[in-house]
Amino acid sequence: MNLNYLRKAEWLLRFLFLDFKRLLDYKLNLGRNSSSSKKEVTMSRKKMHIFLTLLVGLAVIFAFTSCGRLKVSNLKANYYFNRANALFSDNQYRRAIEEYERALVYNPNLVEAFRFLGESYKNLYKPGVEDPLNIEKADRALDALAKAYEIDPKNKDIIYSLGDMYDRMRNFKEAEKYYLKILEMEPTKMENYYVVAQFYTRYAGNSEEDMAEGGKTPFQKAEEMYLRRIEVDPEDPRGYAYIAQFYDNLTPLPEIDKALEFHQIRIKYNPEDAEVWYSIGVNRWAKAHRFQNIISIDEQKKAAEESEAALMKAIELDPSYPEPYAYMSVLSRSVKERLWPERAARFTQEAEQYSQKFQEAQRKRAERRRLEQELRGIR
C-alpha cells in the first residue's frame, strides 16, 4: 500500500468526520423539532451507518499497514540476526558485527543482537593490550552489552557477560558489582557461588590492599563464597570439594592442611569414591614435596606415607583409574628416593612399574571411550 493511497484515505477520514459532526448536529435539531418527518430520521440513520462502516474499514487499513511494516522489519532483523549467529559460531567476529548491526537497524529492541554484538567485540578484545583500537573494542563491547542490559535487566547471561568484560579489563569493582547481581538474583543456585568465588580467586594475589572493601581482601571474599555455598547445602559433598581445590591451588604456596580438612569431610560422604582418595594422595604428596624446605624430615615422611596410603586406596577402589598410578610413580621418584636414600634403587624400579600401569590404564580408558562413541553413533 503506497503513501499516496494512505494520504487519500486520511483526507477521506477527515471529510467523513466533519460530515458526521454535521449529522450529529442535525440529529440534535431533529430531537428539538418534533415536526420533522420520519423519512428524514431514517435517512440520517443510514448515513450514520455508512460513516461507521467506512470508519472501521479505514481503521483496519491503517492497523494492517502498520502491522505489515512491523512484520517485515522483524523478518529482516531476524534474517540478519541468524546470519550473524552463524558467523559468530564460526568465530568470524568482524563479519558477525556487521550483521548484528544490520539486524538492529530493523529491530532496535532485539536484545540478543545487542548481547552478541557485545560478545563479538569482547572476543576481538585482547586483555592487557592498551592500544587505542583495542580500547575501542572494549568500549563497544560494553556499550552493546549495556544496551542489552537496559532492555532486559534481569537476564543473567547479559549480567554475567558484563561482569566478564570488566573482569577481562581488570576493572575489579565494576566486575564485582555484576557478579554479585547474579548471586542476588539466584541465591540458592549453587554454581553462582563458584562463579563469584572464582572471580575473587583471580585477584587473590594482586594488590589486595587496593581492592579490599569492608576490611576483606579478594582472597577472603573467595573463601567466604565457598563457605556460603556449603551453608546453602551442607549435605552436598561438592561444596567441600570446591573449597578443598581452592586451598590446594593457591599460589605461591597452597594451604595444604586446610584443603585436607575438607577432603576428609568428603570421605565421610563418599568413602568409596576413588577420586576423593586420589585427591588426598595428591594433597599429601604436595606437602612432602613442595614444602620440603619448610617442614621437618619427619613431617615429610609422614606426609609421604599418608600419600601412598590414599593413592593405594584409590587403586583398590578403582583399578582402572589411571591417575593414582601416575602419582604413585611421581611419589616414588620425587619424595621417597630423597627421604629414604638407602632404598632408592627399589623406589626407582617401583616408579617405573607404576608408570607402566598408568600407561596401560590410560590406553584401556581411551579404548573404552572410543567404543562408547561408536555405540552412540550406532544408536
Image (cartoon, rainbow, N blue to C red):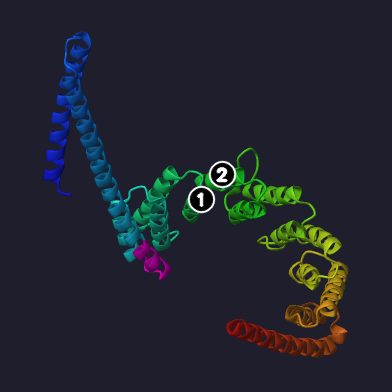
Q: Earlier in the sequence, mark 2 or mark 1?
A: 1
Residue 289: % across, % down: 76, 72
Distance between the alpha carbons at the discs numbered 2 and 1: 9 Å
Read off the residue under disc 2.
181
Crowding at mark 2 (Cα within 10 Å: few <14, some 14-19, many 20+): some
Between 337 and 136, the one lying in front of the other is 136
**Residue ID at (82%, 86%):** 347
**Label number found at residue 79:** none
Q: Main secondary structure of the magenta part?
A: helix
Residue 187 as seen in the image, left or right of residue 341? left
Between 341 and 229, the one lying in front of the other is 229
**Label number found at residue 163:** 1
**Residue ID at (45%, 46%):** 149
Amino acid type assigned to the residue bearing label 2 in the image: Lys
Residue 68 as seen in the image, left or right of residue 221? left
Of the 4 image quadrants, the one containing the C terminus is bottom right
Crowding at mark 1 (Cα within 10 Å: few <14, some 14-19, many 20+): many
Magenta residues, start to end = 82-93
**Residue ID at (79%, 80%):** 328
User: Against 328, is 42 above or below?
Assistant: above
Amino acid type assigned to the residue bearing label 1 in the image: Gly
Name the element at disc 2.
helix
Q: State the image quarter where residue 309 is shown.
A: bottom right
